[in-house]
Image: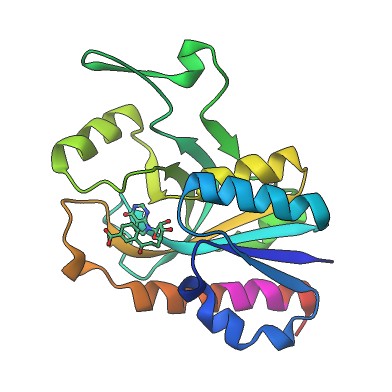
Amino acid sequence: MKTLIVAATRFEIQPFLDRIAAYPNTDYLITEVGMVQTAYRLGKHLANNQYDLIINIGIGGCFNRSLPIGAVVSIDREIFSELGAEDDERFIPIDELGFGSAHYVATQNKTTQELVHALPTGLGVTVNKVHGNEIEISKLLIQIPDALIESMEGGSVFLVASEAKIQTIQIRGISNYVEKRNRATWNVPLAIHNSNAVLFEILSKIYKV
Ligand SMILES: O=C(O)c1cccc(C(=O)CC[C@H]2O[C@@H](n3cnc4c(=O)[nH]cnc43)[C@H](O)[C@@H]2O)c1
């Protein structure tokens, strides 16, 4: 069983990197922040390397205030929310325009689902521009009422993994709520600590270490 850990930045998987020697069948890939960087670097990496499972791990913004900062969630569906066209006040999604789809799902069989079954699960929104304006956030929630987490990479990992037919998990530690930008309320170290703790649990289940 060969696993690839995918993160946007090194700091999001530093606790894992500190223990990487314990996981001989596990590689990692730092894509850099953003959907384009992630699609390019993951696609390029998979052209020369084979895996049974991809685990995308990172921090993210949460739309659901009943989950505390630091909670860890599993994302099983993704939407590229900006993909489409403006028609004056109305947004026309790419699906409606007839040029493909903005929706991607995690490729997960029963064994993969078991690895994350204990986590709160929901829909991820992948963006180029982190939301930080209340009016824009309200518009987004009208467009996507069941949005759980916002990230800048999740949809790209699902897209590439589904094209490559590789099992995929995405876990996100909640570093902030999606709200008017207030960096003082973010807790990045807690989100990283907790998401890496979940990663260790998942790897322990896979490798029995
Ligand atoms: O300080 C900022 O405003 C800021 C803007 C963009 C990215 C960051 C990062 O810390 C980069 C790491 C990573 O963070 C993910 N992330 C965290 N919170 C959110 C969010 O509310 N919306 C979208 N993405 C978020 C993202 O996946 C980055 O890769 C800081």
How far from the left and from the top, in percent, is residue 79?
48, 36
From this view, report whether residue 28 is shown above or below residue 127.
below
Q: Nearer the viewer, residue 55 or 205?
A: 55
Q: Compared with residue 124, is residue 191 higher up or lower down, i.e. above or below?
A: below
27 or 108, nearer to the observer = 27
The residue stretch that appears in magenta: 199-204
* Quadrant position of ligand 1: bottom left
Q: Position of residue 74 (x, y in %)?
A: 52, 56
Confirm whether the magenta stretch covers residue 200.
Answer: yes
Q: Is residue 157 visible?
A: no
Q: Is residue 117 above or below residue 87?
A: below
Quadrant of residue 70 within the rendered picture: bottom left
Residue name at image x 55 percent, y 16 percent: 99
Q: Quadrant of residue 56?
A: bottom right
In the rendered view of the protein, which quadrant contains the C terminus? Answer: bottom right
Residue, x 76% and y 43% (percent of image)? Answer: 164
Residue at image location 44% in from the left, 43% down from the top: 126
Q: From the viewer's perspective, is 136 left or right of 32?
A: left
